[in-house]
Image: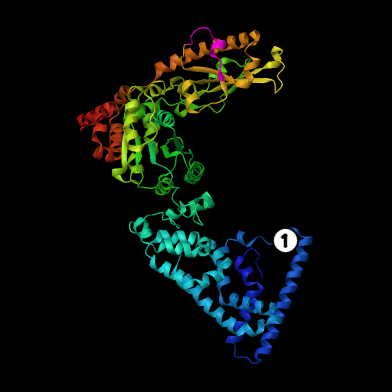
Amino acid sequence: MHNPNSAIERVKNHLAYKLGQAMIDFTNSSSGGGYIALFKKLYKIKKQHKKEQKIYQQTIQVFPQLKYPSLEACSDYEQALRFKFHLSYMLGEVLIKAYQTWYTGGGFKLKNNIKKANKEFQIFREIFKEFDQINSSILEGLIDNKQLFLKEFSRIKNILKIHQDYKAILDNIFHNFNYFIQNFDLIEEWLLSDDFKERYKKENHPYPSLLDPKKLNDKNEKINYHNIPAELAWEMNLPLPDNYEFVWLSSALSGHAAMTMYLELCEVNICKYIHHNPFIIYSNIFMQLLNNPLKYNVIAYTDYTHVYVSRGDLKRFLNLLNKNKPVLYLVRDPISRLKTGLNHINLKANRLDRFDLDTPIERVLDRETYYFESPLPTCDHIKTYWIYAESFFRLNFLTQFFKIEKITYLDMASIKPEYAYHTFSQLNALYHFRQISKNLFHNTVVYDMLGAFLSIPLILCVDLENFGVNYADGKIIEILITTRQFFKLHKINNYKKINPVLFKDNLPFENLIFCIPKEQFVYLENNLTLIKCIQSYLEEFISKMKVKFDLKAKCLICENQILAYLKNNQTLMRQWKKIFDQELICIKQHHPNIVASWKYYQEFEKMCKELD
């Protein structure tokens, strides 16, 4: 062997390959000597091979750096695996097996086993010739399950032939070839069923499931969702477990935080995960569904602009949802969405989420910026950022994976506090989740202007040693600075609100909350020195926060400013017109009443007509 970095050369140097090649050479040779000469040659090859292996092992003991890289690390690994299906390699394996079982009758079976190897070689050659999807993973599966594959070859060939015009399922089979062979009976039944034909093949579904979804949802079946890892389920295109009532979709900047709060009030378990990798989203929702079999589950996907999932990746995730489920899509006037986007803050990397009584308040409040590190929001970001935020314009894309008649569009305006109870009463008639009292809706404040502007919660850390307090579990108490909305949305438990302890007068922010872990309250409640010190710091904190808040409120961009900006940038206005026309095709067609209610979008359309 000349090149240890060549997997092909190393496979051809395997004893099986060398023995088999010698046998083929003998068969094709016209030289004499008969079988005695052949056996002598095979013996010499085996002896020389053993000697070479011994020298190699001794060498790498002295010089470990000379150890060959693994076959998998070689660039020609896939091509090398094919040599294990060459006739020479397969004949060599037969010869080795005959030698190993010689004293138990292996020699008597040699002739038949050689014929069998020739037949098997023809089978593999036929498979490799007919299907170009064969890769290293499939070859490894064939090597590991060779006899099982050969045993069921006629049935496997039949499946591949029946679906030869359905590339997506062939790709799935070959991608999961080990599993396909090991569970062939079950998969064969599914792939030959009318259900598979109607659900996947008939419509040329791009991500067909390798297993029957109905059986997967049955815990009594041998193979079901509970004994399949999420990673394998994703690889086999298994749809998510079916124990969810509907799919909730939302474009970014359309009120999903408020909607989340309302749904949770109705005891809806929202199965959701925010990530740019669709497999991570899938696997987390997969486990959420399995871990909550008795809850009222909803799968949610919000198309955030700051956590971008490409259309190609998102397509696969959405195709693994049940398109027969109802879909609720939360929508909003696109000009109002732009307004919220322009006013949206980004957190600074060096912000302080934790601080103490010695930290300058200005440093704590220096937490946020806008796009491109702008100190204030600006309409210029319409053309420098939002026009390029591709996931801002995907309503039409997201809805194409579901049946039109199953989609309900819900305008964000309908979940404002004054309309929320009526809206959810109507939704309850559709989706049958828990109905809650009118008072509970009215007592839920959903818009968190303070939290959005100042990026709270924050944690004030107070060192008790400075106040002569003997704290058995440590020396720091942590005061959480948050808002009523955040407190409810994130279900913060085991905390006690301490506003009445710290402040006698009403705060300038009615939704601002200060709270402390319940077990730490005992160290605060009767320590007047500690309370006074914390109170003094927080009063200054609130005062400076109010100044900053008021300044930010004055600098907010409104919809009319956006319309004026677009009116003065006609090329940009035409670009947005083209985007909105594409984005809103479906909702204009099926729910023109919602589009007609969008005040600022209608004004935008009027401007565009005047431009023409």
The residue wearing badge 1 is: 66
Does 439 sit left or right of 276 as displayed? left
Tell me the residue at 52%/60% (across/down): 179
Q: Is any atom of residue 352 visible in this view?
A: no
Q: Position of residue 161 (x, y in %)?
A: 40, 69
Figure label count: 1
Answer whether residue 506 is magenta in the image.
yes
Q: Above or below — where is 33 with respect to 324?
A: below
Tell me the residue at 31%/34% (across/down): 576
Query: In this orientation, which residue lies closer to the viewer: 463 or 298?
Result: 298
Q: Is any atom of residue 609 visible in this view?
A: yes
Q: Position of residue 288 (x, y in %)?
A: 50, 41
The residues colored magenta run: 496-507
Q: Above or below — where is 431 with respect to 508?
A: below
Query: In this orientation, which residue lies closer to the viewer: 308 or 332?
Result: 332
Location of the N terminus (image quadrant): bottom right
Secondary structure beneath dot 1 equals: helix
Q: Quadrant of residue 471?
A: top right
Q: Above or below — where is 143 with respect to 446?
A: below
Residue type at mark 1: give it.
Answer: Leu
Answer whether residue 550 is magenta in the image.
no
Q: Position of residue 4 (x, y in %)?
A: 66, 65
Classify mark 1: residues with Cα within 10 Å, few (<14), some (14-19) or many (20+): few
The coloring applied to the image is: rainbow
Query: In this orientation, which residue lies closer to the viewer: 246 or 350?
Result: 246
Query: In this orientation, which residue lies closer to the viewer: 517 or 280?
Result: 517
Location of the C terminus (image quadrant): top left
Q: Position of residue 10 (x, y in %)?
A: 64, 68
